[in-house]
Amino acid sequence: MHDIVLIPGDGIGPEITRSVTKILEKAGAEINWIECEAGEETYNKSGTPLPDKTLDAIKKHRIALKGPLATPVGSGFRSVNVSLRQEFNLYSNIRPAKSLPNIESPFQNVDIVTFRENTQGLYIGKEQWAKEGEHAESIAVVTREASRKIITAAFEYAKSHNRKKVTLVHKANILKLTTGLFLEVGREVAKSYPDIEFEDLIVDNMAMQMVLRPQQFDIIVTTNLFGDILSDLASGLVGGLGVTGAANIGDDAAIFEAVHGSAPDIAGKNLANPTALLFSAMMMLDYLGEKTVMNRILSALYRVLQDQKYVCTPDIGGSGNTATYTEAICAALDF
Ligand code: NAD
């Protein structure tokens, strides 16, 4: 039995977590969920978006499945997602994007996993005014140690998942120190994995290549901001954020989450698509070594998308709702 912290989150979060926990239970996953609160609603109730009780539960159990959390734009409390990544040093943000049956997209046979460095780069938000209101500056941080960790994680994943190639993305022609260091470490780490092909591409060329011929890419590893953008681009190639999962993994903790937001426009209407969170939960099962259960769920999901698209939620072209989609996946698990 695995003890896992469950954070339903805001908006559609409770609906999609209910759907996902139901599917996992039906599939035979042996999980004891420890339900905890976080997000905007929690902030409105208790004055903090990330209560100590939730933090303590993650510290104790080290693994969490998290629904989307609303973050106020511009002002208000700091993003809980960013706080969690820093608190638990979740340096690997892993985002698979794979073409799915019957999901509309001009691109076929895409199968990319993006490894985004999750704790450094421009994304740390270290900004200052050189002259108030006139001249703003931002600092990017890249260390040898953090680069080595994320690049090694990408190669180790490639090795354990039988993948063939790692593409490191950088802008070392211009940002010679920061992304230059990332590239230098990549070339060093690659030497320890002679069976895995290694290449590096400049980020602007990468963006074009991903749209021209995405099938040439397998594993991508890159710095925080480039990874933020390219992993969304990769999701877009296979149907968007509603159908792609994500994991944030460190040395001794992991948080699995949907990357889409809390969708306040459809919250409570039984229209939320649980697929993204279900993929995140499947990544969690992979992390836990529960590959048989993971593969059962994957087959059931593929069968429903292939043969019963009409039961799916409207965002992916179905005429059903969260409940009909969830029931169909549960029923498909029996076959
Ligand atoms: P959003 O992803 O919530 O919604 C964008 C559009 O996609 C909406 O039309 C919504 O209905 C639709 N959508 C999103 N997920 C869906 C799903 N599972 N099924 C069906 N339709 C879905 O983005 P937003 O409106 O920009 O953000 C709303 C809130 O979510 C903000 O407070 C933002 O900070 C937060 N947010 C959280 C996360 C996270 O926790 N990982 C990520 C992004 C945004």
Image: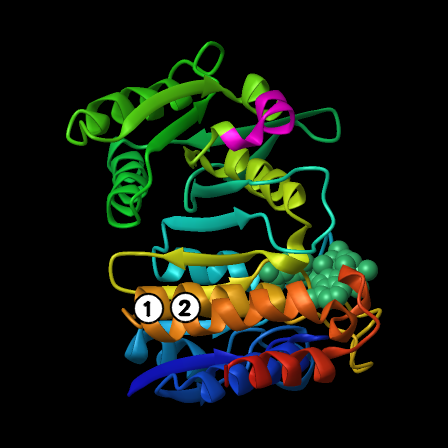
Mark 2: give few (<14), some (14-19) or many (20+) Cα within 10 Å.
some
> Which amino acid type is marked by label 1?
Lys
Range of magenta residues? 208-215
Q: Quadrant of residue 258?
A: bottom right
Q: Quadrant of residue 309?
A: bottom right
Q: CA distance from mark 1 to mark 2?
A: 6 Å
Residue 286 visible, this angle = yes
- Asked whether residue 102 is drawn in magenta, I would say no
Residue placed under numbered mark 2 in the picture: 295
- Residue 77 appears at what percent x and percent y? 63, 63
| Dot 1 and dot 2 residues touching (CB under 8 Å) | yes
- The label number, if any, that marks residue 291 in the structure image: 1
User: Where 92 falls versus 41 (above or below)?
Assistant: above
Residue at image position (25%, 49%) is 160
Q: Could you say which is closer to the camera, residue 130 or residue 322?
A: 322
Quarter that holds the N terminus: bottom left
